[in-house]
Image (tube, grey):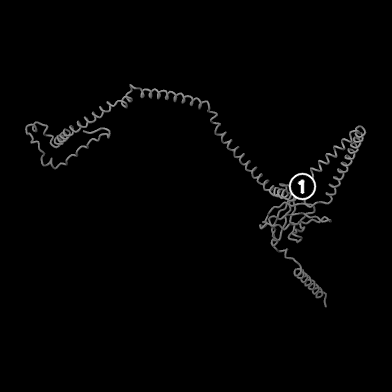
Amino acid sequence: MSDAKLQFRVGLFVIITVVLAGGLVFRFGDMRWLWEPRYTVVLNFDEAPGVQPGIPVRKNGITIGRVREVFFDEEQGGVTVLVEIISRHQLRKDTQARLSLSLLGDATIEFTAGQSPELLKQGTRLKGSLPADPLRLVERLETKVGMTLDAFAETSREWTLVARNVNQLVDTNRGQLDQVIEQAAESMHQFSLTMRHANQLLGDPQNQQNLRETLAALPAMIRDTRAAIVAVRSAVETAESNLKNLNAVTQPLAKHSESIVSKLDGSAGNLELLLAELNQFARLLSSEEGSLRMLVSDPSLYRNLNRSASSLDILLRSVQPIAQDLRILSDKLARHPELLGVGGALRGSSGLKTSEEAEAPRTQQPPVTEFPRGLPRR
C-alpha cells in the first residue's frame, strides 16, 4: 500500500470520526440554544462584580440565556448588563433579577418566577439587586462590635460613677433609706395592683375582640386618611388656582379703582337728583290742585267728558251725509270737468246720475266710529 493511499484512508477515517462525534453531540446534547431565537432584557446594577459577557442567566436554577454585553451607564449611573433570553423561556413582568456570587467568585444572574400574567417585551429595563457580600458583612460587624465594646466601656464607667454616688448617698442619708424603701414597696404594691387590673382588662375576651377589630380596621383608616390628605391637597391646589385667577381678575379693577369709584359717586349723585325730581313730581301729582288729582277725584269732569263724547257722536253722524254728497260731487267733477266752465253753467243738469255714472262702482260707506266702552251712546 502506497503512502498516498494510507494518508487518504487515515484522513477519511478522521473526518468520519469527527462527523460521527458531532452527530452524537447534537443527538445526545442540548444544542438547540445555538439557533433558537432570543430577546434582550436590559438590567441595571449599582455594581456588578464578576459579571462579564458569556456568564449564564438562570431562572429557578435552569439556564435560560447568556450575558451579551456589560458597560457603564452614564445617564443613570451604575452598570448596565444586556441579557439575551431564549424565546421559549418567557419572563413575567413582575420578575426580579438578582446577581449571585459563589464562594469562588463566579457570578450568575438569577430571575424569579413572578406571578403577573403579562410578559416582558424586547428591550425591557429592570433594576437588579446585589447579593450580600460576606466580607463586607464581616467588616460592618467588626465596626459595630468595636462601637459596642466602646459603648460597654463607657457604660461601665457610668455605672462605676453611679455606684460611687449611691455609696455616698447611703452613707449620708442612711436614716432616710427606710422611708425610701417603704415608699418603694408601696409603689411596687400599687404597680402590682395596676398590672393586675390591666391584666383583667386585657384578659376580657370582649376587649380582646374589640382590640383585634381595631387593629384590623387600622390599615383601612390609614388608607382613608391618605385619600383624605390627597383630596385636601387637590382642594388646596384648586383653591390656589382659583385665587390666582381671582387675582388676575381683580388686578385690573384695582388699577382703575379710583376712576370706578369716581364714576360710581357721580352716578349716585345723578340718581339722588333724579329721585328728588321724581319726589317733586309725585308731590305735584298728589296735590289737590293738580290736574291729574282733579281728573281722578272730580266726577263732574267725567260727566262733561261723557257729554262731549256723545255730542261728538251726533256731530259725526250729521256730517256723514254731507261727506257723502261731497264725495259724489267730487266724483262728478272728476268725470265731467267741463261742468265747472261757462258751458256747464248754461247747460244745467238734472241732478241725476247718467247710465255711465250708474255703472260706476259705488263708494264704500265710511266705517262707524267706535266709542270707548265707558262712554254711553245716544
**109 is higher (above) or lower (below) than 252:** below
Where in the figure is residue 284, as x and y percent of width and height? 36, 22
**Residue placed furthest toward the right:** 171
Q: In the rendered view, does 50 fall on the left or right side of 334?
A: right
**272 is higher (above) or lower (below) than 145:** above
Q: In the rendered view, does 126 fall on the left or right side of 264?
A: right
- For the point 22% across and 31% down, which residue is it? 310
Residue tagged 1:
200
In-front residue for pair 315/92: 315
- Residue type at numbered disc 1: Gln
- In the picture, residue 245 is in which quadrant? top right
In-front residue for pair 114/223: 223
- For the point 10% across and 38% down, which residue is it? 352
- In the picture, residue 102 is in which quadrant? bottom right
In-front residue for pair 31/10: 31
Crowdedness of circle 1 by 10 Å Cα count: few (<14), some, many (20+)?
few
Where in the figure is residue 36, as x and y percent of width and height? 70, 63
Quadrant where the image shows the N terminus: bottom right
- For the point 83% across and 41% down, which residue is it? 189
**Residue placed furthest toward the left:** 346
**Residue placed furthest toward the top:** 289
Where in the figure is residue 105, as x and y percent of width and height? 82, 55
Q: Secondary structure at mark 1?
A: helix
Quadrant where the image shows the C terminus: top left
Where in the figure is residue 52, as x and y percent of width and height? 77, 55
Q: How many marks?
A: 1
